Image: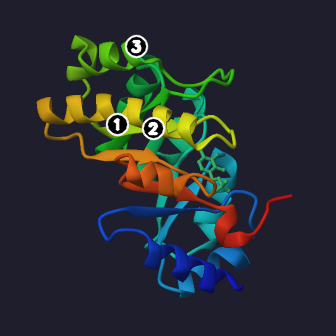
C-alpha cells in the first residue's frame, strides 16, 4: 500500500475527535510531502535538529509536534514554530520553554510526559511527580506556556492486558486533572502497535509512524 492509502486507512478507522500525529522521524522530506499532498498537516518528530531541517524545507502551514526528549539548550531552536511539546518532564525545562516562548511573543502548548511503562527509561514523570508539578506554585508564574494535557507510552509488549492497564492508569489522572483545570484537553497515547487500545482507553491523540511509512531502518 502507498503512504496515502495507509494514511487514509488509519484516518477512516479512528473516531473523528481523535487527532492523528504522523510521526515522520527518519523519513525523507519526499515522503513527508506525500503525506502533505494527501491533506495531512500534523507531523511529529523526536529530534530537534531533524525537525528544524524538515521545517525549513517544507510548507509553513504544517503543525510540528516534538514527541521526543528535549534538552533545555535546544528549546530556543524550536520555540519560534513548534505547536505542541509532548515530552515535558521537569520544571527546569518548562521554565526554559516559557523564557523562549516569551522571546518569540508566543504561548507554547505543552504536555507532561508521564511514565506508565514497566520498562526502564530515563524520561518522564511518575504519577506523583506529574501532579506535584502540575499543581506547583512555580508553574503558575509561567505565563507563556500552557499545559494542555498528558503524554504516555505503554510497555513494548505483546500482552494487550498490560498495555490496557497502563493506558487506563494514565487516563485516570488525565480525567482527574481535566475536571479541575479547563486547559487540560489532550491525552496523547498510542503508536502503530497499540493505538486502538489507547483510543479505547481515552486517548484523543495518537502518534503513528511505521503503520504509515513502513518499518524504519
Ligand atoms: C517513534 C515514536 C512514535 C511512533 O512509533 P511507530 O511505532 O512508528 O508508530 C510515537 N511516539 C514516540 C514518542 C516515538 O518516538
- Seen at 55% across and 87% down, the residue is 37
From the viewer's perspective, tell me whether residue 119 is left or right of residue 39.
right
Give the residue number, with chain letter if any, for mark 2: 167
Q: Specify the quadrant of the image occupied by residue 214.
A: bottom right
Mark 3 sits near ligand 1, with its Cβ under 8 Å away: no
Asked where in the image residue 17 lies, by quadrant, the reply is bottom left
Residue at (62% x, 23% y) in the render: 118
Q: State the residue in front, 115 or 108.
A: 115
Question: What is the C-alpha distance between the residues marked 3 and 1?
Answer: 16 Å
Decide if residue 21 is in sight here: yes
Task: Report which quarter residue 27 is drawn in.
Answer: bottom right
Q: Could you say which is closer to the camera, residue 201 or residue 30?
A: 201
Q: Quadrant of the N terminus?
A: bottom right
How would you rate the neighbour count of disc 3 (Cα within 10 Å): few for under 14, some for 14-19, many for 20 or more?
A: some
Q: Is mark 1 within 8 Å of ligand 1?
A: no
Horizontally, residue 124 falls left or right of residue 214, namely left
Tell me the SS state at disc 3: helix
Q: Residue furthest right?
A: 217
In the rendered structure, which disc, 3 or 2, sits on the residue that comes first in sequence? 3
Front residue of 130 and 195 = 195
Q: Can the viewer see residue 83 in this picture?
A: no
- Callout 1 touching callout 2 (CB < 8 Å): yes
Q: Which mark is residue 171?
A: 1
The residue beneath circle 3 is 129
Q: Which SS class for mark 2? A: helix
Crowd around label 2: few <14 · some 14–19 · many ≥20 (10 Å): many
Percent from the top left, x then y, of residue 168?
40, 36
Secondary structure under tag 1 reads: helix
Q: Residue at x 48, y 24 (%)?
A: 89
Amino acid at each position: 500500500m502507498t503512504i496515502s492509502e495507509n494514511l487514509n486507512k488509519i484516518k477512516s478507522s479512528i473516531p473523528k475527535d481523535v487527532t492523528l500525529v504522523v510521526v515522520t522521524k527518519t523519513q525523507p522530506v519526499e515522503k513527508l510531502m506525500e503525506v502533505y499532498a494527501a491533506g495531512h498537516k500534523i507531523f511529529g518528530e523526536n529530534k530537534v535538529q531533524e525537525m528544524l531541517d524538515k521545517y525549513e524545507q517544507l510548507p509553513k502551514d504544517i503543525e510540528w509536534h516534538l514527541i521526543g526528549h528535549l534538552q533545555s539548550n535546544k528549546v530556543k531552536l524550536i520555540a519560534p514554530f513548534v505547536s505542541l511539546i509532548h515530552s515535558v518532564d521537569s520544571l527546569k525545562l518548562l521554565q526554559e520553554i516559557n523564557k523562549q516562548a516569551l522571546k518569540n511573543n508566543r504561548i507554547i502548548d505543552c504536555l507532561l510526559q508521564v511514565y506508565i511503562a514497566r520498562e526502564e527509561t530515563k524520561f518522564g514523570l511518575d504519577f506523583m511527580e506529574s501532579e506535584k508539578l502540575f499543581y506547583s506554585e512555580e508553574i503558575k508564574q509561567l505565563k507563556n506556556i500552557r499545559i494542555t494535557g498528558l503524554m504516555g507510552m505503554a510497555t513494548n509488549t505483546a500482552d494487550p492486558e498490560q498495555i490496557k492497564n497502563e493506558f487506563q492508569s494514565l487516563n485516570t489522572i488525565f480525567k482527574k486533572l481535566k475536571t479541575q483545570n479547563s486547559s487540560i484537553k489532550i491525552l496523547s497515547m498510542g503508536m502503530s502497535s497499540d493505538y486502538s487500545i489507547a483510543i479505547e482507553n481515552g486517548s484523543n491523540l495518537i502518534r503513528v509512524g511505521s503503520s504509515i511509512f513502513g518499518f524504519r531502518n
